[in-house]
Every structure is written in C-alpha cells, then in structure tokens.
Image (cartoon, rainbow, N blue to C red):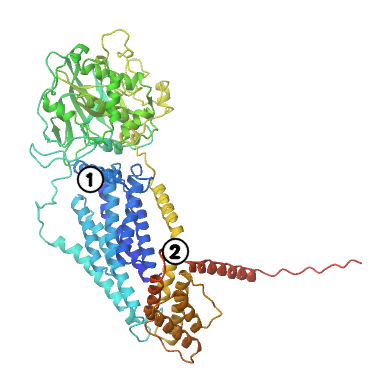
Amino acid sequence: MSGRARLALGAWAATLMASCALLPLVDPATWIFQAACLLAIQSGVGAAARQVPLPRPLTVAAQALVGLLTLTLAFAREQALAGLLPGPDTFRHFADLLRQGGDDIARYAIPAPLESDGIRLMLVGGVLVIGLLVDTLAVTFRSAAPAGLPLLALYSVAAGLSEGGTDWLWFLVAAAGYLMLLLIEGRDRLSQWGRVFGGAPRTPGGEPAAATAPVRTGRRIGAVALGVALVVPLALPAMDGGLLDGTGTGVGSGGGGGGTISAVNPLVSLRDSLNVDEDRQVLSLRTRTSDISDLYLRIVSLDDFDGTTWKPSKRQIVSVPDGTFPLPTGLSPEVERTEITTAISAADWYAQDWLPMPYPPSGVRVGGEWRYEPVGMTLVGDHGQNTRGLTYQVRSLRVRPTAEQLAAAPRPPASLESEYTELPDSLPPVVARTAREVTEGAATAYDRAVALQEYFAINGGFEYDTDVQVGSGSQAIARFLKEKQGFCIHFSFAMAAMARSLDIPARVAVGFAPGSPQTDGSVSVSLRDAHAWPELYFEGVGWTRFEPTPNRGSMPAYTVPDAPGTSVPDVARPSREASEAPSASASASESCTAQQKKLEGCASESPEAALAAGDDGPKWYALLLWALAGLLVLAVPLSPMLWRARARAVRLGAHGRGAADAAAHTLAAWQELTDTAWDYGIVPDDSLTPRRAAARIIRLGRLDPVAAEAVHRVAGAVEQALYAPRPRPAAGLADDVQRVTAGLRARSGRSTRLRARFAPRSAVRAAWAASARWTALRHRVRAARPALPRRPLRQRG
C-alpha cells in the first residue's frame, strides 16, 4: 500500500474514531455504520482522483459531489432527479430535515431517537463534512497537523451535548485517532528519504534501532500527552455554572417551581420501554368504576406539528400542585362529570419519564421527584425520576358531554385556535381537500369531527394493519390516505391534521387504551394496549377524545349524534370484541378472542410499530449498493481516460537517480510521447528507429519548432539509453513530452482533442496487457498441473 493510501485510510479511521463521541447522543447508534460506508465511498473517490492524478481542487470537488450524491440517495431519493441527481426539491427537503433536526435536538433528552431523519442527516452529513476536511488537509495537501482542528470541532460538539460520565473515553478514542494520523504521516515522510540512519541492527527483526527512534518517540509523546490531558483536569478546581454546565439529569432546570421540559418524545420513550417481543403487563389498575371503556391512560399530548411528525411543545413546568388540580381549559359547569380514583402500579421494568394518568387528572398522590406541566396537565419526572416499580393514586374527572353540547360549542378563543390549528406549508394539499370532501354538508365543528371519525373508522375503507410502513416524511399522511392501511399512529395523526385544516383545534394523545379486567378485580394494561388518539377542542367541554382507529379502544358515546340512520355502531359497547370492558389486545382483526390473545395467537402491534412512524425509504445498505452501482456506471465510460491519465502520471513521475533508473525513465517518456501522438491520430510504427519515428511525428503532427525540438531531444535520449555503454540521465524529459502534447493539441481540431482526452486510442494497451497477463496465468497453471502418464498405444494385429 502506498504512503498516500495509508494516509487516506488513517484519515478515514481518525474521522470515525472522533465520531464515536457522538454515539451516546443518539439511540440506537447504528447510524455510525451508515456514516462509515458513505465516508468510505467519499474517501475512495478521493484516493482514485489522487491516483489519476486530478488537480487538488478537482479532487476536493469530486469528493464533495460524491458526498452530496450519497446523502441524496440516503435522505432525499424521492425528491431527486432520477432518484440520484439533487435538484431544487432536494435542497428544500434537506433544509426541512435540518430544521426538523434542530427542533428535535431542542426537544429530546439524551439519547435522542434515531428515527428522526433530521437528526440522522445532521449526524451522517456532519461526519461526511468533517471527513472531507480531514482528508483534504491530511491527504490531498499532505498536512496532517491542521486536520486536528475539524476533529476537535467534532469532538467538542459531542462533548458539549453529552451529559454522561464517559466523555474521557471518547476523548481518548478521538485523540488516539489523531495521533495515529500524525504517525502515519511521519512514517510516510521518513520513507521518502529511505534509510536515513545507519548502524548495526539492535532489534530482533534486524531494523536499525536508530531508524525506529522517531516512531517510538512519537508514540511515547502521544501517550504522555493523553495521560496529561486526562489526569490534569482531575487535579484542577472544578468550575461550575459554565455554558455547558448541566443542572441535573432530569427534565427540570433545578429546584423550585420554574424550569422547562427539555426533553422527551413520548413516542420514542414509550417505544424504548416496551421494546420487547412478548406481551407483558405494563401497569396494573384498581378502580371502583364498573365501566372502564373510557379509562384511557394518557401519558402526554403532541401538539406541535411540523409537517413530518407530531411532537410535544417545549413548555414551562412547575411544582406539582397540592390537593386539587385546576380544572382543565374550556370545561364549563354545565357539562356532567364525576370524579373517580384509580390506583396504578407500574412494572419494575417499565421506566417512563411521563406519568400515565386518566385525563383530566384532578389530583395525584405519588412519591419521588415529579413536576407538573399545566397546559397538558401531565406529570414528568425530574432529575432522573421515572415510573419503574412505582405505585401511585390518581383522582380524575370522567367528563360526559352530550352531542348537543358539543354541537352548540362556541368558537374557541383566538389565541388557542391560532396555536392548535397551525399547519406547515409542506403539508400536501390533498389532506385539506380530503377533509373538505369528507365533511361536506356538516354544519358545525362537531359534525365535521364526527364525520372525520366515521370516515376513518367505518365508511372510508381503511384497514387496520400493523405491518404497513407508510412513512414519516411530509408525504406520509397523503400516502396513508391513498393506501388506506395503517395503525393508530397513522389514524390519529391524519385525523388531527385534517381537523386543523378545518379550523378545529386538535392534538394527538399518546398512552394506553383501556386494559383487560382480571379475576382479582384489577385491570391489566399490557404492551399491546399502547395507543395514540386525537383530541379535539370544543369550548365549554375542553379537550375531547375521538377514536378513528378501527378495532382499537372504544368510540366515545358523545360521538353518536341523535339522528336516524347513523352508521356509527352502538358506542355503549367497545368497538372490539369484549363483553363489558374493552380488550387490551391490539388485535389485527375483529375475530381475535380473549383466549387467542392469552395464547398470543393474534397479530400484534409491536411497540416499535405502534410508537414510531416507519421509514418508507430503502435501507442504508441498499443505498450503498445504489451508490456503488452509480459510481460503476460512471467509471465504465470514463475508464479509458482514467487509465490513460494514470499511465501518463506513472511514466512521467519521479524516478531514481541511477543509470538503470534513468534508462527506464527515458524509455517510459518515449512511450508516453508515442502514445500521445497515437491518441491524436499518429499510429506508432515500431519498425522505425527513434530518430525516424521522431521525424514522422513532427511531419504528421505539423509541430512547431519548439515542439519539434522537444521530440528530437526525447528521441536522442532514447538512442543514448539503448545504445550508449553507460547512458547518462537526461533532464527535462517530462517537460519535453508536455511540450509535444501541447503542440499536438494546438494543431488538432475539436473532435480530435475530445477523442484524445475521453476515448484515447492508446488505451487499447490496457486490453493488450490484460490479455498478456491472462495468457501468462494460463501457462503458469498449465505448467503447475502434474503431467499425466501417457497410455501406450495398442496396435491392432
């Protein structure tokens, strides 16, 4: 392996080692494999461009272009031209993803979810940019020391965001990668001088000890430097209150009643907690009410819609109120309500940062450090507090509005309507158009909401399917409306977005559907009860649950208008097969019985599917194969030009100082001159002497005096190398060949020049060389094959 190839490999490894500092920030950390593959493609293009060789700016440009193509394949294939070439839509999509990634970074706690395409683009794209800078500095411009700056920037970003106690380990890995890069460059520079130091060998391998002294010294210096960097900070006084100083591991900003939720996407948090294959009990409930069809356990609401997904807004949190909570927003005294008490016990493996509660809660008795978010009426753990093994009691209101009250609801306050009906410009127009078509003729907001629920749950032709992958991009809802297959995430997201398009305030709640009654009087909430549903706001009633997902949960009684001919089934009973209380099973069909559920004979909605929108794009390894195929398609038509450029660089490159090396260099220069003439249409004639061949090239190429003199000088050097007893090295042969090339180019037409560059005739020598190697290989194989004894010929008598 050449020195530059080793240096390129070192730059690739150093970038990846520094990128390891980002691993604790995202879960899972599988993005590093995609980044490694795309970075390898980018580095490989740089190595190939330097072998040609291309000018340095063109080498960097080629790497940047390939990096952009691979990112387009990975993140914006649908927006690209022919699925590969980036266009205006591609860059707009990148901007949307980066904006989404910035919002997600502000919302999520460490580790953030990898399902966010914005965060993934930031990670993979950032590694490619840093890798390009490191490769450019260390390999293209042969200066490894400044390459430490982008590596330091990469580590510093990770260290500034990380809250773990293993930062020293990632610093050690990143620093080791940088030192490795410096050592590779040092060895490469020393090797260009040959064996500088002499002396008797003192090592068992026979290498002079003095020759290895610089390498050993560099290793020792690097080890000492790493030790000092790790140990000295421990002996220095601690400095608190800095820019990157954390206030704890929880979501609050310390003690007191202030602070903000900095933090957790409940979809990802719940999915991570429930990411097991078997159906396990999550929560156990005890309540005195006999009807649990409305006993949904709400974790948090998602009220921020950016066109790609729904997220919880970043809001102020306060201390948990003592006694009775304030009434929920918009609830008037005329609406019937009763208070129920529910005792809840969480499994010892279920670690959720948000407290699952019936909505709206009116009081909570819970131990530990919890904070209250007033707008969503949710409790969130502070300083690492979660639900693992927790037992708590919740008092909640069972609100029972009538259809008349909902239909007569006045217009909501302007500030609330503005906040909860906001839709991004990236939302496809088909969403609003479908909402208008479905609700055509509906007189009130309530009628439109019921029409939307019926459209999804009953008469719209939708199917409940946990295996479908509709996607999470800006086209996800439009694709779901077209395919009409999905599960609770798709139904709730689509209905909330369509309700907002009709000026109905809407958000999405995440939590658990009602569980299954047990023989001991408790209610078991299991993994398959993980659920999401839309909440729509009606003034006088407040946030009101709807159930658009077929075969899940139960339709609220207030969604059945008092009108003949309604297609809504009897809502006094659950929409799934259960006698008095809904089953906890997320059955894929209505024929799934409770006994089948216990035997796990029903198709289940896995937590991964239920709580994170699927990625409908191709896998990263498929994109890698596409990228390699694209590079191959580009390389095949350009292979003659690339081979010719490589041959020219080798023939006219550096050479030894001895007589034998000088002769070889002279003959190589002559070969390059004759092949260049061949590319411009002057077929070589091997029967001619160098002097007569030179005259022929001058005559057919109509060269000017300067180029003609250069041809004669090269021919004279060839005659001396062939016939002189002791050939002398000839200086300036490469420059002479360049003069001849310029002269031939100046005397040729445009078509001849283009053919000489992109389809050179002399490239046929590559095929001849391959044929010769193949023939030699066959001869060697035939010679190595043992000879079989000949059978004597039988004579016929």
Q: Which residue is mark 2?
A: 755
Q: Is residue 718 above or below residue 42?
A: below
Please state which of residues 314 and 765 is positioned toward the viewer in this rendering.
765
Mark on residue 110?
A: 1
Location of residue 637 in the rendering, given as x and y in whole percent from the top left corner: 45, 58
Please state which of residues 492 and 673 is positioned toward the viewer in this rendering.
673
The quarter in which the N terminus is drawn is: bottom left
Compared across the picture, whether 633 is left or right of 295 comes to right
Q: Quadrant of residue 280?
A: top left
Count of marks placed on residues = 2
For mark 2, give the secondary structure: helix
Q: Is residue 627 above or below residue 470?
A: below
- Circle 2 packing at 10 Å, graded few (<14), some (14-19), many (20+), is some
For mark 1, give the secondary structure: loop
Marks 1,2: beta carbons within 8 A: no
Q: Residue at x 41, y 29 (%)?
A: 603
- Front tag of 1 and 2: 2
| Residue extending furthest toward the bottom | 725
- Circle 1 packing at 10 Å, graded few (<14), some (14-19), many (20+), is some
- Amino acid at pointer 1: Ile
Location of residue 622 in the rendering, given as x and y in whole percent from the top left corner: 41, 47
- Amino acid at pointer 2: Arg
Q: Is residue 184 above or below residue 610?
A: below
Question: Real-space Cα distance between discs 1 and 2?
Answer: 57 Å
Q: Quadrant of residue 602?
A: top left
